[in-house]
Image (spheres, rainbow, N blue to C red):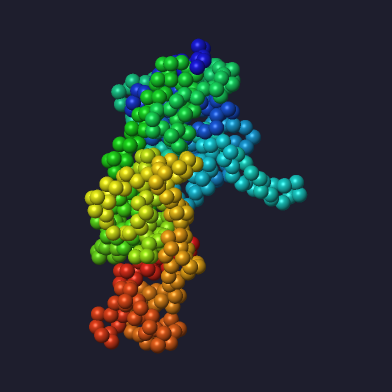
């Protein structure tokens, strides 16, 4: 790796330390690297948003922005953003550094007027981000024009309540009031000229080394990946250009930010949304050695795992999580659906572990080795005994994802996995003929039985006459279907000749039927 001997990093850091007091001394390194990286924007593809945060006013946030406005690449400082179209108009002609003061107001997600501004700030952290803006045409009519949103942005605010997607793009520096007077006042009447000289020095150095920084690809610390890497990699690349000592500082800053993020998660300051909590609960509680897991068995697990989210609460008028809610969350968000069993004894619908494993890994819930889920050939949803669980670990037939060889782990004595069991596919029994195992699948659930379940789910209980009238079926057909549903355990009739109610199994069957229709 080639270093730049004439880099201005040390000079810039000394300048900033003279006028700026950070909570942590090493945060001055962040301000130094972030300021330098703005001058490399023409060749960089991502830029983390600098967040200047403080719990109280008069902590030096505006002072930092003042210095950025004299040292960063083509800076523009503003205390408010009037509309989401302002930033694209400023960035469309040339790359600039946007400095936003009072971000706790301008980027507050609770204010609906800020939605367009927030989306513009979010999209512009990566090259290629654009926004459609109306501009006047030659004929006097307005026309839509795509404008770039890519550019460096620094935001200052008193503990701003940023949206999660905005905060995930930020590099935070904490500022507290300098009650001890450790730094000098920024008297721009006297320091503006030397600040301009420093900016010109930085600009010339960056222009000379832009081709060199393109070739710099330092290996980031473990765990720094995805969007987190997109924010920190530009700063680490600039640090690498400034020499081994600065590279070490850059790596340390990225590792420290990652550790702080994990500490916030562990302490509950940052919580995952319910959809992620549901996925994590299923990973941590999936019965060992079991491929299939029915919705009716998942619901009590969720209620016990996180009662505040999924258990019934009479005081808060909250019902227990339903099969429909589980199916919607897993299906709509993650594309995970129940699949029908393929054995003669079990043709019910259930979730399959082999479908979940790739999602567990992609979401960072499971380690990469969990990509491969052993499959025993059994689709029973009952818990396996210790012998079965131990046998599962010895099975060579595995699922294949990510383009890895399909034969990995398959011995010559193993039959290949049936196509209907490949993760991501959901076989629908259309033809009642024999399946791959020689079993004859039953016909799809008649629609009038689904209507009966839906009616009972909505009304709680009803007698046969009311059900027949509501579903449009005759009394004889309704009686036959009710008898079948009772035999399947999906409806109940506590008293002879009394009203019918839907059972837990009925709720599950209704959810599965609704999910199949939606799919």
Q: Residue at x 35, y 76 (%)?
A: 485
| Residue 377 image offset from top left, x and y in percent | 37, 54
Do we see residue 58 in this rendering? Answer: no
Q: Residue furthest top?
A: 5
- Give left or right: position of 84 versus 347: right
Q: Residue at x 37, y 39 (%)?
A: 369
Q: Residue at x 47, y 29 (%)?
A: 233
Query: Height in image: 340 above or below 480?
Result: above
Residue 362 sits in quarter: top left
Do we see residue 309 in this rendering? Answer: yes
| Residue 186 image offset from top left, x and y in percent | 44, 22
- Give left or right: position of 143 versus 74: right
Q: Residue furthest front?
A: 413
| Residue 439 image offset from top left, x and y in percent | 42, 65
Q: Residue at x 43, y 18 (%)?
A: 246
- Give left or right: position of 19 versus 495: right
Q: Relative to the observer, which residue lies in front, 459 or 164?
A: 459
């Amino acid at each position: 790796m080639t270093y730049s001997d004439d880099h201005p990093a040390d000079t810039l850091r000394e300048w900033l330390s003279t006028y700026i007091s950070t909570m942590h001394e090493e945060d001055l390194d962040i301000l130094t690297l972030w300021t330098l990286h703005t001058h490399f924007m023409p060749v960089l593809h991502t830029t983390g948003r600098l967040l200047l945060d403080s719990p109280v006013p008069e902590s030096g946030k505006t002072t930092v922005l003042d210095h950025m406005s004299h040292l960063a690449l083509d800076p523009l400082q503003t205390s408010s953003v009037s509309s989401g179209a302002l930033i694209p108009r400023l960035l469309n002609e040339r790359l600039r550094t946007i400095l936003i003061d009072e971000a706790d107001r301008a980027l507050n997600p609770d204010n609906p007027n800020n939605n367009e501004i927030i989306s513009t700030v979010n999209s512009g952290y990566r090259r290629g981000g654009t926004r459609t803006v109306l501009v006047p045409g030659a004929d006097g009519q307005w026309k839509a024009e795509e404008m770039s949103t890519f550019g460096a942005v620094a935001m200052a605010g008193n503990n701003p309540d940023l949206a999660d997607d905005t905060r995930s793009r930020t590099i935070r520096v904490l500022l507290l009031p300098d009650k001890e007077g450790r730094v000098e006042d920024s008297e721009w009447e006297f320091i503006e000229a030397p600040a301009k000289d420093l900016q010109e020095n930085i600009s010339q150095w960056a222009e000379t080394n832009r081709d060199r920084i393109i070739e710099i690809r330092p290996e980031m610390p473990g765990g720094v990946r995805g969007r987190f890497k997109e924010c920190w990699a530009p700063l680490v690349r600039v640090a690498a250009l400034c020499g081994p000592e600065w590279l070490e500082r850059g790596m340390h800053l990225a590792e420290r930010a990652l550790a702080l993020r994990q500490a916030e998660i562990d302490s509950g300051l940052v919580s995952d949304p319910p959809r992620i909590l549901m996925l994590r609960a299923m990973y941590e509680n999936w019965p060992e050695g079991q491929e299939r897991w029915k919705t009716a068995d998942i619901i009590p697990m969720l209620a016990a795992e996180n009662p505040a989210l999924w258990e019934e609460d009479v005081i808060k008028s909250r019902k227990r999580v339903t099969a429909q809610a589980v199916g919607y969350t897993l299906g709509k968000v993650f594309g995970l659906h129940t699949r029908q069993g393929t054995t003669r004894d079990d043709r019910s619908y259930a979730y399959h572990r082999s479908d979940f494993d790739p999602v567990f890994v992609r979401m960072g819930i499971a380690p990469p080795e969990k990509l491969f889920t052993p499959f025993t050939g059994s689709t029973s949803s009952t818990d396996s005994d210790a012998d079965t669980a131990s046998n599962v670990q010895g099975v060579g037939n595995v699922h294949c994802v990510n383009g890895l060889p399909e034969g990995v782990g398959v011995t010559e004595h193993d039959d290949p996995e049936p196509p209907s069991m490949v993760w991501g596919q959901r076989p629908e029994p259309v033809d009642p003929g024999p399946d791959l195992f020689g079993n004859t699948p039953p016909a799809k659930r008649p629609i009038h039985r689904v209507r009966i379940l839906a009616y009972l789910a909505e009304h709680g209980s009803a007698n046969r006459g009311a059900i027949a009238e509501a579903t449009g079926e005759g009394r004889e057909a309704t009686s036959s279907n009710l008898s079948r549903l009772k035999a399947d355990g999906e409806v109940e009739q506590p008293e002879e000749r009394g009203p019918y109610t839907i059972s837990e199994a009925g709720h599950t069957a209704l959810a599965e039927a609704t999910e199949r229709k939606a799919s």
